Amino acid sequence: MLKFTNVAPLPPAKRSARERVGDSAEIYAGLSQAQASSQAERCAQCGVPFCQNACPLQNNIPDWLKLTAEGRLREAYDISAATNPMPEVCGRICPQDRLCEQACVVEQSRHGAVTIGAIEKHITETAWLNGWVQPVRPGQARGQSVGIVGAGPAGLAAAERLRTLGYTVTVYDRHDRIGGLLTYGIPGFKLEKSVVERRARRLIEAGVDFTLNCAVGADLDFETLRGRHDALLIATGVYKARPLDVAHADRSVQALDYLTAASRADFGEHVEEFESGRLSAQGKNIVVIGGGDTAMDCVRTAIRRGAKSVTCLYRRDRSNMPGSIREVTCAEEEGVHFEWLAQPIEIGAHSVAATRMRLGVADADGRQAAHPVDGSAFAQAADLVIAALGFEPENIPALWKAPQLDVRASGALRVNPASFETSIPGVFAAGDIVRGASLVVWALRDGLDAAESMHVRLSRSRQSQLVAAE
Ligand SMILES: Cc1cc2nc3c(=O)[nH]c(=O)nc-3n(C[C@H](O)[C@H](O)[C@H](O)COP(=O)(O)OP(=O)(O)OC[C@H]3O[C@@H](n4cnc5c(N)ncnc54)[C@H](O)[C@@H]3O)c2cc1C
Ligand code: SF4
């Protein structure tokens, strides 16, 4: 260990931009065992591991790095899997540069972070390859049933934990596939669909029941659902797109509609919106409005789907982008053109009218306000405009006819922070629907914590039932 002074950091190899824009496969290669162990040896084995503190799952990173350095991959996997239900997913898509790797002491000493995410992926991919990933073993049946609404990372993490504890678990989702945004949101070039399908299969094999194509509030009444289960978890994510405030905004399409259609096409489905041209990028000038990670996923998807040109309009500059710089760099390499300091005003039939912006003084959060520059209007060619301004919670109390479900001003469900219980006893909530748009790793964390809390509550009510029956 402690080799950071003489071993340079080695990020995983990236396929060339020319090659990767020709398909939707992941762009990063895995590490070889030799690379993984020499990179793991760079770890300083800090007494107080800042990387672990910065990881929402509190992964025991120094221990699994040491075991990887020693070639003890199976033990490394056991430790990694003890805190993370999807380490190979997090290894791929966590923004490590804002989490564990940013906090790494080796990074802080300017030697370049230990490549924690890539090693985490390597450990778990090796485990899958060697059959070390054990089936989920359902605990002794407790005669209690739990319903989970939402098959995204929060719902899946809770489902696995609760099944292990012996509950009968049914997961409801309005989509036809399991995974939430892991399946219909995050593109395959960041996370291949087979990685998610493998996790979903493991839960099905453990007896978790999935009721798909079932939208709670529309196909299934919330009160009926409550009557079916001893406890409920709401893990429905956030799906209301932030509105685009420009003239003829109705001429734009929503980012998630676009990304979902592209995911369906990657699954080999016939996608009507691509055939009709409504969502097709083929041969078109594409403009994406927004500067976050969703916008980056849209521009990079459009490039892969044969666009003539792809331009991202963002009202601040590169250094003020909310999206990860790693993703912006990938987009630039792949041929995306960025119009920084540009604000759209009107969407025309074949162009977007925009104005130049300048940055003013920073506000209390340190963010510089953007102001229009007089007389700087310009037109950007656009046959398809994609709005990617982020997401807010849907109005669950109204949609589910459950006015007693308490929400915050943002529309996010209000829960007791210690128990994850909503204002309705026995109904819990976790993930983006509580936190607002966040990260996969936080959804996993919340799903696990909510499951523990549901277990405590259900154990108590089971105990009271047993006492009453005696
Ligand atoms: C385009 C995009 C890219 C992203 N990239 C990254 C990334 O690279 N790294 C990262 O860490 N995070 C990323 N995120 C954020 C991350 O995907 C989310 O934070 C995470 O998926 C939230 O998990 P969740 O389980 O709370 O909700 P979701 O993953 O949104 O899952 C919620 C599920 O609930 C279902 N549902 C909703 N309403 C109902 C209903 N009424 N009835 C039945 N089912 C319902 C939905 O169909 C969905 O399957 C990205 C988000 C987007 C939009
Ligand atoms: S889960 Fe994410 S933050 Fe935690 S160690 Fe893995 S990559 Fe880092």
Image (spheres, helix red, strand yellow):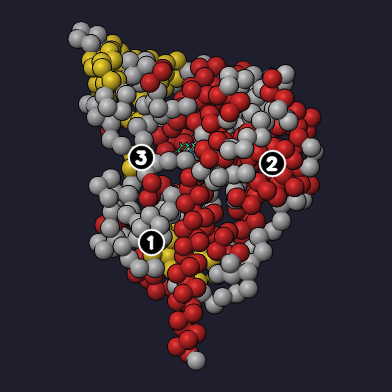
**Mark number, residue 391:** 3
Residue type (three-letter) at the residue carrying disc 2: Trp
Task: Report the mark closest to the observer, 1 or 2.
Answer: 2
At mark 3, the secondary structure is: strand
Image spot of residue 274 (x, y percent):
47, 34
The residue that label 2 is drawn on is: 64
Residue type (three-letter) at the residue carrying disc 1: Glu
Task: Report the mark closest to the observer, 1 or 3.
Answer: 1
Task: Report the mark closest to the observer, 2 or 3.
Answer: 2
User: Spatial distance from mark 2 to mark 3, Cα to Cα?
Assistant: 36 Å
Q: Is residue 247 left or right of residue 56?
A: left
- Where 414 falls versus 58 (above or below)? below
User: Is 271 in front, or is 440?
Assistant: 440
User: Is 93 in front, or is 361?
Assistant: 361
If you read the primary sequence from the N terminus, does the residue marked by circle 1 or circle 3 appear first? 3
From this viewpoint, which residue is outermost toward the bottom? 470
Characterize the local packing of mark 2: few (<14), some (14-19) or many (20 or more) Cα atoms within 10 angstroms: many
At mark 2, the secondary structure is: helix
Q: Quick one: quadrant of the N terminus?
A: top right
Does residue 28 appear anywhere in the picture?
no
Image spot of residue 464 (x, y percent):
45, 81
Characterize the local packing of mark 3: few (<14), some (14-19) or many (20 or more) Cα atoms within 10 angstroms: some
User: Is 147 in front, or is 185?
Assistant: 147
